[in-house]
Image (tube, rainbow, N blue to C red):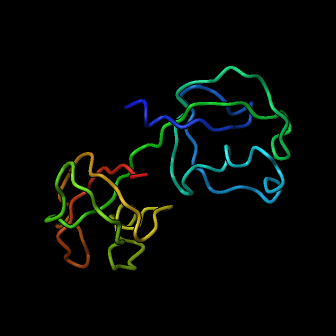
Amino acid sequence: MEESDTIITLIGTKLAKVGNEFIFKSGAKECEPCRLNKTCLGLNSGSTYRITALRNGGKLECFVHDSGVCAVEVIELPVEISVESRKAIKGSTIVFEPVPCNITGCINYAVCRPAGLRRGDKFTLVSVGEDISGSCEKDYTLKVAEVKRLT
């Protein structure tokens, strides 16, 4: 990972361990009046992050975490999505468009409709994986790709 991929945020002291992963959902109502909320809430909703380092600076008071928060360095983890085979080119930039399918029982549903992603999100294709066209119940020509959000 590049150094520019590192984000500094605040997390509950009980959760602040190098290697821990979490999905950022959003801020709580109690976060609104906090003067530090921009630091805590500067992550992408629905994205998964891994703590890579703890920062010095001690514990800070928090309205949500009873033991306070501390500063940590995190990286956003790549996401697996399905991509039209013709667009599945490593290094390319894509705009996320969920596959027009509502078959929730399909084995590909989780990569075709990954949680936390929104139509229009921009990504770079990090790697291209297996062809899942044969298992697509709507006969779409798809590949699994690992993508990283563009900021």
Residue 86 in which image quadrant: bottom left
Q: Residue at x 30, y 50 (%)?
A: 146
Question: Residue 85: x, y in percent?
Answer: 16, 64
Drawn side of residue 31 relative to residue 11, left or right: right
| Position above or below: 14 against 142 | above
The residue furthest front is 35
Question: Residue 9: x, y in percent?
Answer: 63, 38
> Toward the viewer: 90 or 110?
90
Drawn side of residue 130 relative to residue 49, left or right: left
Residue 136 in which image quadrant: bottom left
Question: Residue 122: x, y in percent?
Answer: 37, 60
Drawn side of residue 4 relative to residue 95, left or right: right
Question: Residue 137: x, y in percent?
Answer: 26, 76
The residue furthest top is 56
Q: Residue at x 35, y 66 (%)?
A: 96
Q: Residue at x 55, y 38 (%)?
A: 21
> Toward the viewer: 126 or 20?
126
> Toward the viewer: 84 or 96?
96
- In which quadrant is the N terminus drawn? top left
Q: Residue at x 38, y 77 (%)?
A: 103
Drawn side of residue 67 relative to residue 7, left or right: right
| Position above or below: 17 against 147 | above
